[in-house]
Amino acid sequence: MSKPIFVDPVLDGAADPVVIRNRQSGQWWMFYTNRRANMEDPGSGWIHGSPIGYAVSDDGVDWSYRGQVAGLDDPSHPGLNTHWAPEIIWGLGEYHMYLSYTRGAPDDFNVDRHIVHFTSPDLMTWTRRSVLPLHSEKVIDACVARCPDGLYRLWYKDERGGSSTWSVTSTNLYYWTHEGLVLPGKPDANPHEGPNVFELGGKIWLVVDEWHGMGVYHSDDAKSWTRQGVILAEPGTDPEDRCYARHGDVVVQDGWAEMFYFTHPGWDEQAKPVPQTAGERRTVLHIAGLEVVDGVLVANRDVSPRVLKDWPQL
């Protein structure tokens, strides 16, 4: 039931998925952070130096690995660099990627991180456009949606701001205007990452990874948010799904949705602060079914994938 839908065959570290319909082929494409989980070296080097992997499906149920995305490095940064959490949307006649990028493959977390904009006509060839000027020099995890006020809004995590969520707005997906703090992090509220925004059941939802499940907020305008609580904190039935759901992406269909998320099936998250061995660092991708019942977002991770069809997104 809640068994993995995809395991990376090269590095065993698929995480932070984003799923999009390929308008040319009609297939579903899934891009993901490909952590170097099979490294046995101590420290944090395994989580850096990661490429972006991708897989393809005709129906959103069965996925085939296709490789790693080329051309995402800054031309002035030779060697191995770090690519995390791509956000990919179709807008204004082209595909847009907003990628979390770190120079090099550092062995610690005290480094600058930026969100870099790319465009593509076909999801294969990407052109680097700009580094977004955001609230700090340590930002990751972009999410982009077109909102009821007609603006595109980009939400992101500010690691130097207590792991909080901030937003910027745009009319053209190239130039962005600072908007401000959306969800506070520590010490005032729960620290979090991986914002994802979607519309379902007559409400706009914002879901964030709080590292003990997904924090859920709802809104009518995508600007003011009310907290609902936490979903996907309870384990699924499959042995590979017995831990917290992490950093998801939501694909909305007609009256229902699926969240694509990842787990660390070999890591006892409550006993160890960080995964240390290759078995603990390994990650796999799952889906959970989402629906709105009496105004409440409900998630069920013990479901089989459903066939995805093209459907307008927020």
Image: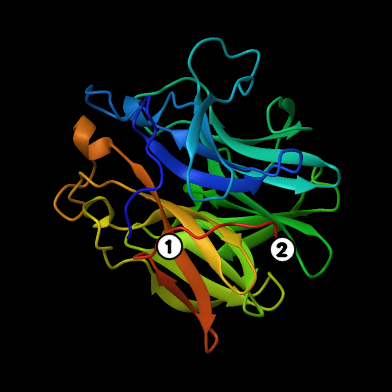
Instruction: Name the residue nearer the viewer: 308 or 278.
Output: 308
Q: Position of residue 127 (x, y in %)?
A: 75, 25
The mark lying in front, picked from 1 and 2, is: 1
Can you say whether 312 is above or below 29 in the image? below
The N terminus appears in which quarter of the rendering?
Answer: bottom left
Give me the residue at 49% from left, 50% from top: 61
Query: With 82 as the anchor, is 270 left or right in this view?
Result: left
Q: Position of residue 196 (x, y in %)?
A: 56, 58
Can you say whether 186 is above or below 277 in the image? below
Near mark 2 (Cα within 10 A), the count class, few <14, some 14-19 or many ≥20, is some
Q: Amino acid at mark 2?
A: Leu
Res. 107 in view = yes
Give me the residue at 24% from left, 42% from top: 274
Per the image, label 2 sits on a secondary structure element best described as: loop
Q: CA distance from mark 1 to mark 2?
A: 20 Å
- The circle on residue 314 is 2
Can you say whether 93 is above or below 211 in the image? above
- The circle on residue 288 is 1
Q: Position of residue 309 (x, y in %)?
A: 65, 57
Per the image, label 1 sits on a secondary structure element best described as: strand
**Across the whole image, how many numbered discs are drawn on residues?**
2
Can you say whether 297 is above or below 160 in the image? below
Q: Amino acid at mark 1?
A: Ala
